Amino acid sequence: MSKKRVPQGMTPELLDSMQQILQGFKGSDLSDMMRHVSGQDPAMLEAVINAVSDAKEKNQVDLSTFDYASLRIKRDSFWVVQLTQMGFGDPLTGRVADNQFPGSQPVFQIIIYDDRNSYRVLEQADKPGLPPSSFVLQAIQKAMANPIPPLRPQLPEFLLVARKLQQHLPVLKPFLDSFPAPFTWRIETREEEEEVANGVHEMNIAGVKNGIRDAEQEKERGNRAFVNKDRKKAIEHYNKAIDCLLDAESQKPTDAELVKIKAVEAVCFSNRAASWLLPGEGQDAQKALADADRAIEEDCEYAKAYYRKAKALLTLSRTDDAIDALTSALMKPNFAFEKGLNDALVEAYGGFPDTADALRTFCLEKFKNEDGDKRARHVAEFRRRAEAQLKTILGPDATIDSL
C-alpha cells in the first residue's frame, strides 16, 4: 500500500481531518465552503482545530532570527499585501460586531495572497484601530517564512503593497530593500487600487445575491421542518439561513438589498422563535423571546414577530408583559386589525366571559372604569370583538357605551 503524501507544513493528523471534513463538499466558492464546514460534526471540527494548533507548534518559526536571505525566489510569481476591514470592536471590552456601535473602532486584517489566489497570511490585529507598522512587517515576514500550510517558505519575484499601507513604509522599506534581484516590490498605483476595489465590489454583488438566495432556501427547509414539528431540524435550517444573511450583509449590499436582508432576517428569527415554542422536550420560551425581540429589531413592521413575543411571554407566565407587548403593537395603524395579534390579546386576557354578569364586569373594567385596565381601551378590533360578545350574550341592542 502506498504511503499518503503529506504536504510540507501540514501534519498527517491535519491532513486526515481536513480530508474527512471536505468529503461531500460540492460548493463553488468560499461562502459555500464555510457553510459546509459549519454543518460538520463538532467533534471533527475540534479535531481539525487541535491538528492546526499542533501543526503551528511543529512548524513555528522565530521571525526575528529567521534567515530570509536564504529563501528561494519563485520566478514569475507575485504576492499582494492588502489591508481589509473586518468589522468594529470595542478597545475596552473586546466586543466585536459587523456594524459600528458607540465607542467602537474598525477592526483590520492583513491579507497576503499569491498569483494562484492562495492565502499565505490572514492576520487580524489584536486591537481595534489601524494596526502598527510592526504588525504589518510581521505579517509580511510570516508570509515569507511561515505561511499558512501547505504553502512553503519562499519569496515572490514581485510584491505589491496596498496604498493603504503607505504610512508603514519607513519600517517596511529597509526590510524589503534588503533582498537582491530579481525580487522587486512597490506600492500599488491608484489605478491598481481601483481595480482591486472593483473586483471586490463585483464579488460583493455576487455574494449578496447568493447569500439572499441561499437564505431563502434554508428558510423554506426550516418552514417544512416546523410544519412537521421537527424543532431540531427547523432551528438548524433557520440558523443556516441567518448565517447566509449575515454573510450577505457584510458584503456591502445596496439599500434595497439591505431592506430585503433585514426583512428575511426578521422572518427567520421569528420562525426560530416559533420553533423554540413547539411543545415537548427542548421547548425554550426564553430563547423564543430573545429571537422575537431580535426579529422586531430587524423589522419593526413584521406583525408575526410581536405575536411570537407575546406567545413566549405567555409561556413564561408573564401575562402583563404579553398584554403590554400586544397593545403596543396593535396601536400601530398597520397592525390594528391584524387577526393573530388580536387573537393573542383576547387569549392573554383569558378570553371573553360567556355569562352576563362576568361579561359586564369585564367590559366595564377594560373600557369604562376610571381605575380599570386601560391598556386595550383604544384597540379598535378588541373593542369590536368585546361588543360582539355583548350582543351575543345580552342581546342585539347591547353596547359598551350603554353599560
Image: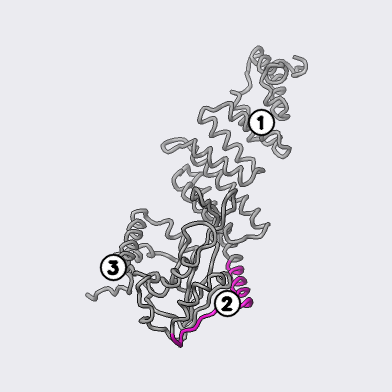
The boundaries of the magenta stretch are: 180-203
Which quarter of the image is occupied by the C terminus?
A: top right
Q: Which residue is mark 1?
A: 327
C-alpha separation, residue under disc 2 versus residue under disc 3: 39 Å
Q: In percent of the image, x 55 and y 57: which residue is there?
A: 87
Reply above or below: 174 against 350.
below
Which circle, 3 or 1, is nearer the viewer? 3
Sequence-first tag of 2 and 3: 3
Give neighbour class at mark 3: few <14, some 14-19, many 20+ (Cα, 10 Å): some
Q: Does label 3 or label 1 sit earlier along the sequence?
A: 3
Residue 23 image offset from top left, x and y in percent: 37, 65
Q: Nearer the viewer, residue 124 or 210?
A: 124
**Residue found at the very far left of the displayed protein:** 1
Residue 30 drawn in magenta? no
Amino acid type, residue under disc 3 in the picture:
Pro
Residue underneath mark 2:
188
Q: Is residue 215 shown to the viewer in this render?
A: no
On-image quarter of the N terminus: bottom left
The circle on residue 12 is 3
The three-letter amino acid code for the residue at tag 1 is: Thr
Task: Give the left or right position of residue 263, taking residue 32 as reference.
Answer: right
Q: Position of residue 317 (x, y in %)?
A: 52, 27
The image quadrant that residue 377 belongs to is top right
Specify how the rendered protein is coloured: one colour
Residue in the image at 29% along x and 64% along y:
13
Badge 1 density bin: few <14, some 14–19, many ≥20, Cα 10 Å = many
Task: Answer with the quarter of the image where residue 196 lies.
Answer: bottom right
User: Which numbered marker is on residue 380?
Assistant: none
146 and 332: which one is in front? 146
